[in-house]
Each structure stands twice: as C-alpha cells, then as structure tokens.
Amino acid sequence: MNRSETGYLSSDKRYVWGDTVITIGLRAAPSEVTFAIYDSQVGEMQNVDRIRIPSAFHWPDSLKYIRSNLLDILREYRVERAGIRLTEPNARSINYERIHIEGVIQEAFASSELTHYFAGAIATIAKHLKVERAAIKLMVEGANILNVQNWDGMADKEREAVLTAMGAVNV
C-alpha cells in the first residue's frame, strides 16, 4: 500500500500514514552504519543498506556525514519509530569510534520527527521483539525464526539492523 500525502492522528496519539508504521533499525560499525527500513503493515523490509563513511574524511566530518545522511533517510521513508543496536555493556574491547557513531545516531533521533525510539543492546532488542535473549543470538547467527525474506543472504550486521527495526514497532 502506498501512503497518501495525508495522515491522521491515531487513538494512541501517534501520527499515522494510512495504517502503516515505518521503522528503522541501525547497527553502527567504525566505518559504516547498517540500516533496515521495515513496513509493519505488510510485514516486510523495504530496504537494507549501509551508510559508508568516506575514508578521506576526518573524524568530525565522518560524524556529520552520518547524521546528515541518517536524517535524509528518516525523511525519505517517513520513518516514525526507530531503534539502534548498541555495543554490549560488557564487551571485552571497546570500540570508541562505534560508540561515537551510536551517540550521533541518538542525537539525530532526538532532532528528527520520530515519534518513538529506543537504544539498547541485545537484551533490549529481545524485549521489544517479545522473544528470549537467546533467540536473538540464534537469529543473528542465521536462524530465520521470524521468516524474514532474504535472511540467508544477510550479514550479521544486517540481521541485527533488521531485528532492531522490527523491534521498533513495539516502542
């Protein structure tokens, strides 16, 4: 279903384009951000892609590039809800570039027209998907428990972004 140019305010006080809630899930890495756009009405991914940081950029310009591109994606798809998969709090090695990117993404969420968003590690994503934490790990490793199209062709980061997008429906 294509969304019309007009929407309405639903009974739970969120703005809805038709009956569709479009969500985005993100998974940051030091040189790119993987994102997935999910249409909850039809129950399928609309896009799974990456924002790749040009290697010639200095670090502040890289962060600005991510923010600018993410805000453009949120507007283009009329995303209403979002989620970001954060670094695990007990990670053995901390990647500060990834953490900086995750912070910029959260700031972009706050600066956007999103109605709801969340940021969290695997346990938080599991809570929003209403599955056990162990199921998330199995799905990231390849188990297609939620029957997502093209699951076998996705990399781990893409799967994490997809699961985060699907979980954002329940924020």
Image (cartoon, rainbow, N blue to C red):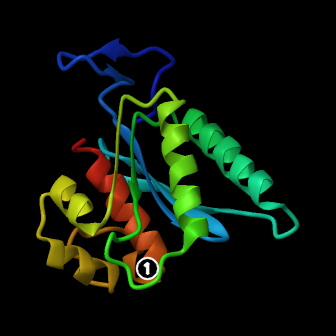
Task: Give x and y (percent) for residue 4.
Answer: 47, 21
Residue 144 visible from this viewpoint: no
Q: Secondary structure at mark 1?
A: helix
Residue most extreme to the right: 56
Q: Position of residue 47 (x, y in %)?
A: 52, 56
Q: Nearer the viewer, residue 22 or 62?
A: 62
Nearer the observer, 66 or 40: 66
**Depicted 32 relative to depicted 152: above or below:** above
Q: Nearer the viewer, residue 164 or 150?
A: 164
Residue at 54% over, 30% down: 111
Q: Residue visible at 11% across and 70% down?
A: 132
**Left or right of 144 on screen, residue 88:** right
**On the rendered image, what quadrant is the C terminus found in?**
top left
Residue 77 place in picture, x, y as percent: 54, 38
Residue depicted at x 33% and y 86%: 141
Q: Note whether residue 148 is visible.
A: yes
Other residues around mark 1 within 10 Å, as few (<14) / some (14–19) / many (≥20): some
Residue type at mark 1 is: Asp
Which residue is tagged 1?
156
Q: How many marks?
A: 1
Q: Which corner quadrant holds the N terminus?
A: top left
Q: Residue at x 53, y 40 (%)?
A: 107
